[in-house]
């Protein structure tokens, strides 16, 4: 049996670094703050409208997808900005494609939110 306490410490540090990365993403990227507001709104709506377990899975998956895409987009932007101090067409294309990936994920998340939440909101509004 491996009693590697150093390994556990490394794992704990890796979680610390990951949470620091999330904090840096939110701190430095205005779009991440928009995603944070949308995340809070979607989770609050899910509780308020009492969505099913399957609906929660969809909402959580698309939230994670948007956050991951935003994080990868930020990495692409930061790396290209660091290595290409002057305009470079390849850097522009890479950054635009990464931003487009975030947009695709956000639109899919929006569509899932509308499909899940709109009928429930209409039902709640109609019953009052």
Image (tube, grey):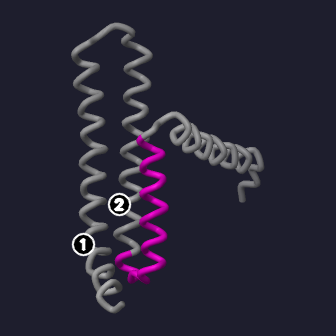
Question: Which of 29/126 is in front?
Answer: 126
Q: Position of residue 124 (x, y in %)?
A: 35, 85
Precedes in sequence: disc 1 or disc 2: 2
Question: How crowded is the residue under tag 1: few (<14 C-alpha within 10 Å), some, or many (20+)?
Answer: few
**Residue 37 part of the magenta-drawn span:** yes
Q: Quadrant of the N terminus?
A: bottom right
Residue bearing the label numbered 2: 62
Residue pictured at 42% horizontal, 57% vertical: 38
Question: Which of 117/87 is in front?
Answer: 117
Give residue 85's mark. Answer: none
Residue bearing the label numbered 1: 115
Q: Kindly report the secondary structure that dominates the magenta region of the rendered protein.
A: helix
**Residue 85 part of the magenta-drawn span:** no
Q: Position of residue 92 (x, y in %)?
A: 26, 21
The picture quadrant where one finds residue 117 is bottom left
Does 88 sit above or below residue 63?
above
For numbered disc 2, what is the local secondary structure? helix
Q: Is residue 90 left or right of residue 36?
A: left
Q: Position of residue 87 (x, y in %)?
A: 29, 10
Q: Residue furthest front?
A: 128
Residue pictured at 42% horizontal, 66% vertical: 42
Residue pictured at 43% horizontal, 75% vertical: 46
| Highlighted range, magenta | 31-55
For numbered disc 1, what is the local secondary structure? helix
């Amino acid at each position: 049996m491996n009693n590697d306490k150093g390994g556990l410490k490394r794992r704990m540090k890796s979680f610390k670094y990951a949470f620091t990365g999330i904090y840096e993403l939110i701190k430095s990227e205005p779009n991440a703050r928009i995603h944070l507001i949308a995340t809070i709104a979607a989770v609050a709506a899910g509780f308020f409208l009492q969505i099913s377990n399957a609906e929660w899975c969809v909402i959580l998956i698309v939230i994670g997808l948007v956050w991951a895409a935003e994080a990868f987009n930020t990495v692409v932007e930061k790396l290209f900005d660091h290595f290409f101090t002057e305009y470079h067409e390849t850097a522009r294309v890479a950054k635009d494609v990464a931003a487009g990936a975030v947009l695709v994920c956000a639109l899919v998340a929006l569509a899932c939110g509308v499909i899940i939440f709109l009928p429930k909101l209409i039902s709640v509004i109609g019953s009052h």
